[in-house]
Image (tube, coloured by chain):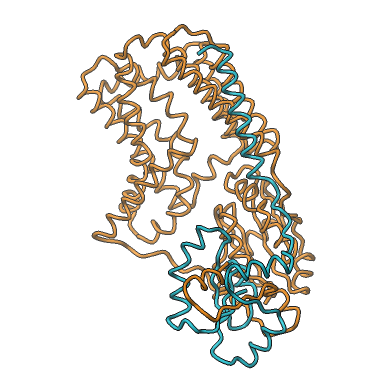
């Protein structure tokens, strides 16, 4: 390929060896490997120091964009129906007043979120762990199902209604919106979990809790911006023509979104096949209900199109979920940890990859389902590596506790690379999801010379 | 749009999704080594000459001029082992990456158009 390009570029003396490196190596000719200093035993370099001026501004803009991007993760969905129902009741107010209410709501959300963020950063990633606890996951899923039931009209939403009334009575008007935001910040807090680990070292390095607070505040403002627009929108929703009829259908749609959320939150607790089937079933159920069974009046062409779109999205999502699972190829062959295994690997000069994971951790699943199912990774792992899995789902195993101390593992996922001599390459250590191509580079970094 | 039409649209979308998934997940075709005739044919069309390992070894040990060895495999393959002295120039076998590679490749090979270059 490249030879052809070179000829096209006008080079005259171009050769190609189609047998390439494998034959060369077999013939015992001189070879080299070049890990590019990838395997480095020293601990990771420290994060960049304090910022000021323009670089601070640009960083903050980046953080803000990151917050916006977090809206793509499903953890914000529970806030959507709550926002709609709270601000839906505020319609009939002037545009300016609605704007003020929305801004206060956003500010409240961001402040709570930022406080929790700084707290988590200073105490060590508590927030990520919060949404990884089976009890919390179960409770969240239950609340979502109950809210969904109310959306379907099985019962009237009273509890948040009572809360809003109490809030508006005691704090009256604007204070109510601020209070609402401050309270709901707790619900939004887990969303910034993925960022906490990354920002942790940085905020700690800034050495100033105030600056750390500002970082998290910026992040949370980005996170809350779409909710702000949603609040304004739902405040003026009832002014739309003939809203009554199709609003009922929209409520049912919201109900299905909430059910899907519940299934998503339960995912870490169920075996992979079951959780995928559950999500697919919710998507299919939504499609059938919203597209065919529901007989909400509303004969307008536009509404019929919306119904078809909803059915289409549901069907495609269900097919995609079930299909991806069914078509997935073989994965990496993991072995449980034992000292003996490591000793054997050292004797054979084989590098070792130890994956600390837990069933309830989302990035661990992503690593397993994407990276550790990539054909090249699987091939290389089976051929040249000893792959060890340490499952931390249940606490208290003395061997695991010792390993956590020995390797200084702070959370899951943590993937560590040992070279052929059994030393850890500290700079290769992973604490988050990594796509297969980059993972292959790291694997090459510890491979036998 | 009546319910029947809607059903048809959804079934079509379902079939499309399944087809796409099958395409994306189908096991990569077994990499069979191209036959010698194919390789020679490709070389003739590309306008370059072929070497086998022994010839390359001779050239490598007694280079008539300055020899440039270019490893076109992926970055991680190069890192895990390559011919000593080769430089890495990863190139995927698609026309798009070939088109994009022109400028960096010219920079790598330098201004001397008669330079001896071996790709593998």
Q: Is residue B53 left or right of residue A236?
A: right
Please tell me which residue is depicted at 35% across the width and 65% down the height of the picture: A49
Where is residue A419 drawn, in percent x and y? 66, 71
**Does residue A93 show up?**
yes
* Closer-to-camera residue (B22/A294): B22
Please tell me which residue is depicted at 65% across the width and 29% down the height of the picture: A278
* Closer-to-camera residue (A54/B27): B27
Q: Vertically, is A192 above or below B51?
A: above
Chain given the colour orange: A
How many marks the image carries: the answer is: 0
Please tell me which residue is depicted at 62% across the width and 24% down the height of the picture: B11
Q: Which image quadrant for residue A56?
A: bottom left
Chain given the colour cyan: B
Q: Is residue A195 left or right of residue B116?
A: left
Where is residue A312 drawn, in percent x and y? 54, 25
Quadrant of the rendering where the C terminus of chain B is positioned: bottom right
Please tell me which residue is depicted at 61% across the width and 39% down the height of the picture: B20
Where is residue A231 drawn, in percent x and y? 33, 26
**Does residue A41 show up?**
no
Where is residue A179 drawn, in percent x and y? 33, 28
Q: Vertically, is A23 above or below A50?
A: below
* Closer-to-camera residue (A13/A35): A13
């Amino acid at each position: 390929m490249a030879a052809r390009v070179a000829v096209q570029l006008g080079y005259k003396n171009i050769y190609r060896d189609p047998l390439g490196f494998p034959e060369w190596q077999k013939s015992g000719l001189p070879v080299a490997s070049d890990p590019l200093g990838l395997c480095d035993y020293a601990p990771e370099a420290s994060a960049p120091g304090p910022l000021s001026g323009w670089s601070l501004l640009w960083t903050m803009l980046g953080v803000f964009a990151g917050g916006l991007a977090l809206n793509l993760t499903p953890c914000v969905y529970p806030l959507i129906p709550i926002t709609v129902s709270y601000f839906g009741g505020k319609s009939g107010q002037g545009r300016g007043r609605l704007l003020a209410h929305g801004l206060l709501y956003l500010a409240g959300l961001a402040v709570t979120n930022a406080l929790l963020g700084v707290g988590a950063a200073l105490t060590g990633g508590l927030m990520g762990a919060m949404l990884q606890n089976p009890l919390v996951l179960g409770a969240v899923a239950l609340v979502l199902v109950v809210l969904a039931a109310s959306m379907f009209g099985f019962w009237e939403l009273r509890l948040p209604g009572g809360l809003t009334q109490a809030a508006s009575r005691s704090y009256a008007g604007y204070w109510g919106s601020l209070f609402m935001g401050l309270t709901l910040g707790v619900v939004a807090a887990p969303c910034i979990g993925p960022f906490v680990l990354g920002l942790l070292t940085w905020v700690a390095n800034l050495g100033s809790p105030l600056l750390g607070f500002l970082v998290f505040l910026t992040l949370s403002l980005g996170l809350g911006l779409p909710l702000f627009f949603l609040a304004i929108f739902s405040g003026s929703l009832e002014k739309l023509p003939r809203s009554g009829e199709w609003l009922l259908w929209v409520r049912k749609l919201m109900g299905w979104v909430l059910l899907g959320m519940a299934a998503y939150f339960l995912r870490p607790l169920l075996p992979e096949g079951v959780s995928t089937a559950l999500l697919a079933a919710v998507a299919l159920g939504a499609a059938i209900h919203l597209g065919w069974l529901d007989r909400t009046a509303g004969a307008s062409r536009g509404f019929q199109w919306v119904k078809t779109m909803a059915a289409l999205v549901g069907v495609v999502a269900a097919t995609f979920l079930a299909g991806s699972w069914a078509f997935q190829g073989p994965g990496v062959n993991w072995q449980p940890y034992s000292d003996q295994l490591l000793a054997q690997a050292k004797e054979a000069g084989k590098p070792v990859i130890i994956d600390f994971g837990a069933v309830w951790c989302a990035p661990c699943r992503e690593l397993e389902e994407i990276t550790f199912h990539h054909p090249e990774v699987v091939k290389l792992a089976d051929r040249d590596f000893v792959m060890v899995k340490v499952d931390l789902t249940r606490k208290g195993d003395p061997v695991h506790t010792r390993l956590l101390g020995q390797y200084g593992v702070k959370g899951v996922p943590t993937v560590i690379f040992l070279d052929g001599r059994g030393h850890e390459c500290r700079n290769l250590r992973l604490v988050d999801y990594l796509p297969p191509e980059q993972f292959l580079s790291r694997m090459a970094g510890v491979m036998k010379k | 749009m009546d319910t029947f039409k809607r059903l048809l649209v959804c079934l079509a979308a379902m079939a499309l999704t399944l087809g796409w998934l099958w395409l994306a997940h189908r096991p990569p075709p077994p990499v069979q080594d191209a036959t010698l005739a194919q390789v020679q044919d490709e070389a003739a069309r590309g306008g370059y000459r072929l070497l086998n390992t022994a010839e390359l070894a001779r050239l490598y040990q007694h280079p008539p001029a300055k020899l440039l060895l270019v490893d076109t495999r992926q970055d991680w393959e190069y890192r895990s082992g390559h011919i000593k002295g080769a430089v890495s120039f990863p190139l995927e076998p698609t026309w798009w990456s070939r088109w994009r590679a022109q400028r960096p490749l010219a920079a790598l090979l330098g201004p001397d158009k008669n330079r001896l270059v071996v790709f593998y």
